[in-house]
Image (spheres, helix red, strand yellow):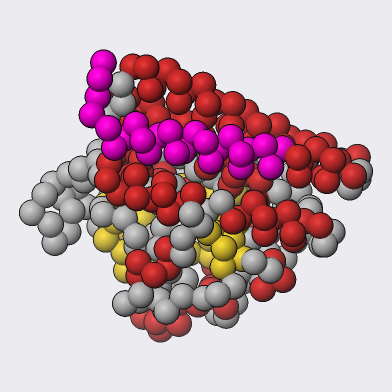
């Protein structure tokens, strides 16, 4: 019986806006081979046309979910979904169950009552009945704690005692999306594939960029799983619907959409660097595109910070006066820059 074990983790993944991305990338990014997959994806955006539908307001689109889970849509994670009621039927010792999973190299993803998860110094415990998904990736029997990854309130790894973990698990009800937990096993060889590695797909990148520019409904690519919904907007259309919902005055305190937009622009910029480093862009195209996408990323960062200032000052006029104008400027610059990137990817290199 092992005294302690800690699975590989990167607690500073590329995307932090939603845990669905952060947890997946925290595992995958411990192996540099994930980079080709990462830069071939994370291009399309999706949002609810009406935020009152209570879905995710604005996010990256990586395909349909299954069992409340988007993490299945990658090449290397072997995922198992288990009903919480089944786990509780099989064992009354959740601590030993999780330790057993980690011993077999499974990360455990489950919802906890955050009241029992100690926050950063300066932050009080969360109130009861606030439940959030948390990734468990290690344990220490001698010191009686688990290593976990989650928002605390910032995304980071920390320790939770076995007793607090047990309370946090048992105080989370079996309802909504809290009814299941997930086990992830990192497979170095892609399951079901003859190929060990994921190859960067420049054609798919170009097609995805076109889909983003044309606001293409990418749920149609997964029609065998998802019949699609007409309440969703994609690509460039998200700017229009985000502003439309912001004007209602009901959602401007939600900082996540603009955080997603900023991370999206960061991904676009890092993709330019990756494509150049791997000889898919010429020196001249790289130099030009890097400047264009840096400007777009900086604008997105500016409006992200501006929203925070508006929330502190409670000056709603800042929203329309600055953020709306900047969103229009981002959309205009992005349309031009992405068209030029597509052209550069579809033409032979000249230098």
Q: Position of residue 125 (x, y in %)?
A: 72, 52
Q: Is residue 259 magenta?
A: no
Q: Position of residue 148 (x, y in %)?
A: 48, 49
The magenta segment is 326-351
Quadrant of the rendering where the C terminus is positioned: top left
Q: Position of residue 46 (x, y in %)?
A: 54, 59
Q: Is residue 334 magenta?
A: yes
Q: Left of 121 or right of it: where is 198?
A: left
Vertical comparison of 119 with 347: above or below: below
The answer, for residue 305, to whether it is visible in the render is yes
Number of dots carrying numbers: 0
Quadrant in the rendering for residue 348: top left
Q: Residue drawn at (26%, 53%), measured in percent from left and top?
A: 76
Q: Residue drawn at (24%, 24%), measured in percent from left and top?
A: 349
Vertical comparison of 253 with 325: above or below: below
Q: Residue drawn at (57%, 63%), measured in percent from left and top?
A: 233
Vertical comparison of 104 with 153: above or below: below
Q: Nearer the viewer, residue 133 or 117?
A: 133
Q: Position of residue 194 (x, y in %)?
A: 8, 54
User: Mostly what secondary structure, the magenta segment?
Assistant: helix
The answer, for residue 180, to whether it is visible in the render is no
Q: Residue furthest left?
A: 194
Quadrant in the rendering for residue 201: top left
Q: Left of 200 or right of it: where is 145?
A: right
């Amino acid at each position: 019986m092992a005294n302690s074990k800690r699975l590989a983790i990167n607690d500073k993944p590329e995307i932090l806006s939603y845990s669905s991305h952060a947890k997946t990338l925290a595992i995958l990014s411990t192996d540099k081979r994930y980079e080709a997959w990462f830069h071939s994806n994370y291009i399309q955006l999706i949002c609810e046309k009406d935020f009152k539908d209570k879905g995710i307001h604005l996010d990256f689109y990586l395909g349909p979910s299954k069992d409340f889970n988007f993490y299945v849509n990658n090449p290397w994670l072997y995922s198992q979904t288990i009903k919480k009621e089944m786990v509780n039927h099989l064992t009354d010792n959740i601590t030993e169950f999780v330790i057993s999973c980690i011993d077999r190299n499974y990360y455990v993803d489950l919802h906890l009552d955050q009241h029992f998860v100690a926050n950063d110094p300066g932050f009080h415990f969360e109130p009861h009945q606030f439940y959030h998904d948390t990734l468990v990736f290690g344990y220490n029997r001698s010191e009686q704690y688990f290593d976990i990854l989650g928002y605390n309130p910032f995304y980071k790894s920390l320790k939770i005692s076995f007793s607090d973990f047990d309370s946090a698990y048992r105080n989370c009800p079996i309802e909504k999306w809290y009814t299941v937990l997930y086990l992830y096993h990192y497979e170095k060889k892609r399951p079901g594939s003859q190929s060990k590695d994921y190859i960067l797909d420049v054609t798919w990148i170009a097609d995805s960029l076109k889909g983003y520019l044309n606001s293409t409904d990418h749920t149609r690519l997964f029609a065998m799983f998802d019949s699609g919904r007409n309440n969703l907007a994609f690509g460039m259309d998200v700017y229009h619907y985000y502003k439309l919902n912001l004007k209602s005055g009901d959602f401007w305190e939600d900082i996540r959409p603009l955080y997603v937009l900023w991370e999206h622009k960061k991904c676009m910029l890092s993709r330019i660097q990756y494509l150049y480093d791997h000889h898919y862009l010429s020196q001249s195209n790289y130099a030009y595109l890097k400047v264009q996408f840096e400007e777009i990323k900086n604008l997105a960062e500016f409006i992200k910070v501006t929203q925070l200032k508006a929330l502190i000052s409670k000056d709603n006029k800042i929203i329309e006066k600055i953020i709306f104008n900047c969103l229009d400027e981002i959309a205009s610059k992005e349309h031009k820059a992405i068209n030029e990137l597509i052209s550069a990817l579809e033409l032979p290199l000249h230098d």
